[in-house]
């Protein structure tokens, strides 16, 4: 099947978020006040496309308070690379840094501040089939391995008795860039399928056995929307903006759960969060939890100024984070992201309170 992806449609998909967030944006970056409030500090952030609508909206709320954010939604991997190179004020990454990535940082200890949770949907474009098609981990893995190629395959039909499935081919869409959403999705597939774990594995980039790549959540959303029979993994807010149908996915408790804000928050229930806050929410054991959930982090140096920021920039980052972990949690929920559960939120706020500038506390 010929895959049709146009830059215009991908840009249009992302522009929907810009409109929803009340800020001007392109498919790769958003400036929320480079020439804004007099005396304000300009921050440059880069990374997660999953979190981009949230950070853009938070920044727009703080524009009049002197926080001017230029955020480049380039994917978690590219964001970490830019932070490592010292070209941005912070990285936005869905998976936490690996030890090898941490070792490349030369300006001190990095701190992970969790901000919100996002469900990763298995979204499909299938005429006549409503949301809620039941899929489990082994079946999803077989689809993305290229082993299941028809929508009426016995493996899918068995999970969906009474549902009329077309005989059309399945078109797999995956991310082409280094992506935290990919890391979350492939982690679930690896936990569900020994073949996926041994042959493909899990990371921000993997060697895909089949399918066509698209850049960013917006790019995957555009490709799914444009191609009948397509399936792709898309963050929930992007799926809702595009009126997608998406699967109810079987969790470890044997329940088929749809991606909602409550089921996304429930995914963190029982997760052990270490002292450094570098946790992962995928493949929850919670009975009512959606099993493909991604956490997302803002990554900064513990000593912001030794990390290369000015005093005013350090204050701006702290103000940005304090807002995001305060009123910004309800803003995130309005954008179809799940807020942090209270215990995790308290730990995130405590981590922000320990940030310094040349060894001194930072007000924000």
Image (spheres, helix red, strand yellow):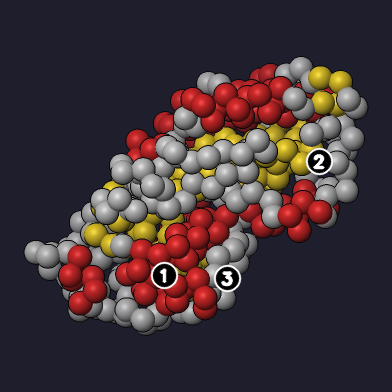
The residue positioned 79% from the left and 34% from the top of the image is 302
Which percent across, then down, holds residue 104? 83, 55
Q: Nearer the viewer, residue 224 or 172?
A: 172
**Residue 252 position (above or below residue 33):** below
Q: Nearer the viewer, residue 187 or 312?
A: 187
Mark positioned earlier in the residue sequence (1 or 3): 1
Q: Which residue is mark 1?
A: 193
| 363 to the left or right of 164 | right
The residue positioned 49% from the left and 46% from the top of the image is 281
Asked if residue 125 can be seen in this view, the reply is yes
Q: Which residue is mark 2?
A: 109
Which percent across, then down, holds residue 83? 77, 48
The residue positioned 38% from the left and 38% from the top of the image is 266
Calculate the distance from the C-alpha at mark 3 to the C-alpha at mark 2.
28 Å
| 180 to the left or right of 119 | right
Q: Which residue is mark 3?
A: 206
| 295 to the left or right of 131 | right
Dividing the picture into quadrants, the one containing residue 136 is bottom left
Eye-nearest disc, 3 or 2: 2
Calculate the distance from the C-alpha at mark 1 to the C-alpha at mark 3.
15 Å
Which percent across, then down, holds residue 330? 46, 25
Q: Residue furthest left?
A: 162
Q: Nearer the viewer, residue 237 or 120?
A: 120
Badge 2: residue crowd in 10 Å (few <14, some 14–19, many ≥20): some
Eye-nearest disc, 1 or 3: 1
- What secondary structure is found at the residue carrying circle 2? loop
Mark positioned earlier in the residue sequence (2 or 1): 2
Dividing the picture into quadrants, the one containing residue 265 is top left
């Amino acid at each position: 099947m010929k895959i049709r992806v146009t830059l215009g449609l991908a840009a249009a998909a992302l522009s929907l978020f810009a409109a929803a967030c009340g800020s001007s944006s392109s498919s790769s970056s958003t400036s929320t006040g480079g020439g804004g409030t007099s005396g304000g500090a300009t921050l440059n952030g880069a990374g997660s496309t999953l979190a981009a609508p949230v950070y853009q909206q938070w920044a727009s709320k703080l524009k009049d308070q002197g926080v001017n954010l230029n955020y480049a939604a380039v994917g978690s991997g590219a964001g970490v690379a830019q932070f490592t190179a010292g070209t941005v004020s912070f990285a936005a990454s869905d998976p936490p840094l690996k030890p090898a990535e941490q070792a490349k940082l030369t300006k001190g200890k990095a701190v992970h501040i969790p901000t919100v949770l996002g469900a990763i949907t298995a979204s499909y474009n299938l005429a006549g089939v409503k949301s809620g098609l039941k899929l489990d981990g082994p079946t999803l893995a077989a689809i993305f391995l290229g082993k299941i190629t028809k929508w009426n395959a016995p493996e899918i039909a068995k999970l969906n008795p009474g549902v009329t499935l077309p005989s059309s081919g399945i078109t797999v869409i995956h991310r082409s860039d280094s992506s935290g959403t990919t890391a979350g999705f492939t982690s679930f597939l690896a936990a569900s399928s020994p073949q996926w774990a041994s042959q493909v594995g899990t990371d921000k980039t993997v060697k895909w056995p089949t399918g066509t790549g698209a850049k960013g959540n917006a790019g995957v959303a555009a490709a799914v929307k444009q191609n009948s029979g397509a399936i792709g993994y898309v963050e929930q807010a992007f799926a809702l903006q595009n009126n997608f149908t998406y699967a109810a996915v079987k969790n470890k408790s044997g329940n088929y759960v749809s991606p909602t804000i409550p089921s996304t928050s429930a995914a963190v229930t029982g997760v052990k969060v270490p002292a450094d806050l570098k946790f992962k929410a995928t493949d929850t054991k919670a009975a009512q939890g959606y099993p493909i959930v991604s956490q997302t982090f803002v990554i900064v140096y513990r000593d912001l100024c030794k990390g290369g920021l000015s005093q005013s920039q350090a204050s701006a980052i702290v103000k940005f984070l304090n807002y995001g972990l305060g009123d910004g949690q309800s803003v995130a929920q309005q954008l179809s992201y799940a807020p942090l559960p209270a215990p995790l939120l308290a730990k995130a706020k405590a981590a922000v309170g320990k940030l310094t500038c040349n060894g001194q506390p930072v007000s924000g």
